[in-house]
Image (cartoon, rainbow, N blue to C red):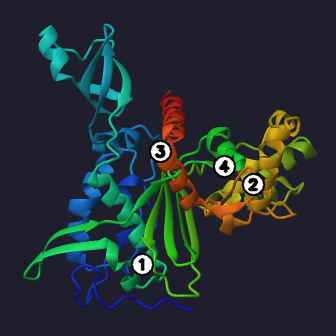
């Protein structure tokens, strides 16, 4: 069934006479997904200024270090951020831009000199994830995604707050409950902590009984469930997913050294083309494959690729340990069918416990977090460390 275009702005309620493109994931974060079915140009400008701008500023430490970032690779456009630096075994607050220290008032006053030539080590960046700005920005992504996928505004209204003076909007905010993601089964732990780190955004919109959830993963690090509704009409079934990479695609054609059939097979597998012995034809196939390559990804293939690259030593280690083997086998059965094809609708929506029982992922996490948050803190730290290692490697 084709989704009808929205006639009225979701914020001001006025008729949409001019379509305005709104990024579901903010453009400043490299988001590619756009919708013209959400709001009018005036409200779009308001949201961009008062919700998106402060929200995306939180991620400046990451954006400023991404090589070939999909939005811009112009270093002059990079925004400064704050963090901690180390000098003579003492920690200072500093302003950082493009991975370089551009100011440290306390150290400058202390030394009474120019600090630009000093050996300053950046030891941490400041991320404030517990404030209203972060929660509103994440909720707005979930809200936009649900709207663009045809969810009725009446279902989502309970979490949308609009303050007006006469007809003028003074403030827009969202109050949807948020639950941080934490891997509860062995397959998810492997995917998140033991596979190669890649920069991507992803979203999963799904229903479970009377609830509507949106799972959001930004930069493969900031992972949350947003509860958009707990009163879905009976019989409502919702599922959609989206994934994209964040770095511009290198479309340079490779130099083909094709002396052996084995060489052809390697290039064919690398670029996803049919092999052939005619060099001109084979080069043409690779050129077309590179031209068609997209930053938008199939979430199913992302998962399959990660599992396909599991080292033999890792799988043998699991096979030798009965305590690890059964939980791993249970979660594999949940996520993959007998042909090793992903059961994509189960991924990050359902999980298994040690006995193989299946449960709602967000509800299971919420139950655990009420008992102990130590594991979540350790997981969050591990994800930040993986992101930092990736960025440092790319900056070299």
At numbered mark 4, what does the secondary structure look like: helix, strand or loop? helix
At numbered mark 2, what does the secondary structure look like: helix, strand or loop? helix
Gap in Å between the C-alphas at discs 2 and 3?
36 Å
Measured as percent of width and height from the top left, residue 62 is found at 41, 41
Measured as percent of width and height from the top left, residue 207 is found at 56, 75
Q: Which of the marked residues, 2 or 1, is nearer the chain's N terminus?
A: 1
273 over 321 or under it: above or below? below
Residue corresponding to mark 4: 188
Measured as percent of width and height from the top left, residue 201 is found at 51, 55
Residue 93, by quadrant, is top left
Instruction: Report the disc number at residue 111.
Output: none
Q: Which of the marked residues, 1 or 3, is nearer the chain's N terminus?
A: 3
Q: Are marks 2 and 4 in contact (CB under 8 Å)?
A: yes
Q: Are marks 1 and 4 in contact (CB under 8 Å)?
A: no
Gap in Å between the C-alphas at discs 1 and 4?
28 Å
Q: Residue furthest right?
A: 261
Front residue of this view, candidates 135 and 393: 135
């Amino acid at each position: 069934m084709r989704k009808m275009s929205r006639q009225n702005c979701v914020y001001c309620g006025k008729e949409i006479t001019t379509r305005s493109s709104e990024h579901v994931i903010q453009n400043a974060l490299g988001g590619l997904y756009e919708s013209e079915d959400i709001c009018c140009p005036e409200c779009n400008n308001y949201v961009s200024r008062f919700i998106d701008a402060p929200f995306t500023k939180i991620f400046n430490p990451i954006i400023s270090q991404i090589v070939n970032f999909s939005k811009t690779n112009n270093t002059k456009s990079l925004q400064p951020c704050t963090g901690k630096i180390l000098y003579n075994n003492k920690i200072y607050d500093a302003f950082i831009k493009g991975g370089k220290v551009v100011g440290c008032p306390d150290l400058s006053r202390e030394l009474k000199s120019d600090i630009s030539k000093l050996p300053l080590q950046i030891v941490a960046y400041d991320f404030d994830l517990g404030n209203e700005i972060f929660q509103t920005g994440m909720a707005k992504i979930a809200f936009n995604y649900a709207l663009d996928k045809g969810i009725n505004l009446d279902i989502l209204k309970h979490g949308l707050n609009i303050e007006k003076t006469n007809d003028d909007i003074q403030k827009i905010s969202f109050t949807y409950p948020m639950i941080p993601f934490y891997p509860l089964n062995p397959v998810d732990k492997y995917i998140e902590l033991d596979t190669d780190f890649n920069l991507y955004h992803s979203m999963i919109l799904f229903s479970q009984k009377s609830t509507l959830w949106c799972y959001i993963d930004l930069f493969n690090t900031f992972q949350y469930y947003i509860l958009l509704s707990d009163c879905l009409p009976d019989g409502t079934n919702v599922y959609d997913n989206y994934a994209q990479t964040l770095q511009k695609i290198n479309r340079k054609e490779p130099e083909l050294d094709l002396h052996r059939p084995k060489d052809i097979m390697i290039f064919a597998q690398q670029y996803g083309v049919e092999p052939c012995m005619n060099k001109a034809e084979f080069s043409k196939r690779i050129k077309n494959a590179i031209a068609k390559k997209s930053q938008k990804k199939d979430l199913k293939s992302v998962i399959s690729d990660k599992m396909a690259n599991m080292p033999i030593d890792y799988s043998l280690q699991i096979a030798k340990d009965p305590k690890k083997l059964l939980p791993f086998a249970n979660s594999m059965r949940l996520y993959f069918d007998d042909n090793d094809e992903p059961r994509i609708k189960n991924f990050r929506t359902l999980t298994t416990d040690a006995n193989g029982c299946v449960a709602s992922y967000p509800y299971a996490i919420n139950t655990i977090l009420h008992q102990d948050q130590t594991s979540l803190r350790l997981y969050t730290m591990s994800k930040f460390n993986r992101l930092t290692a990736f960025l440092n490697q790319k900056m070299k």
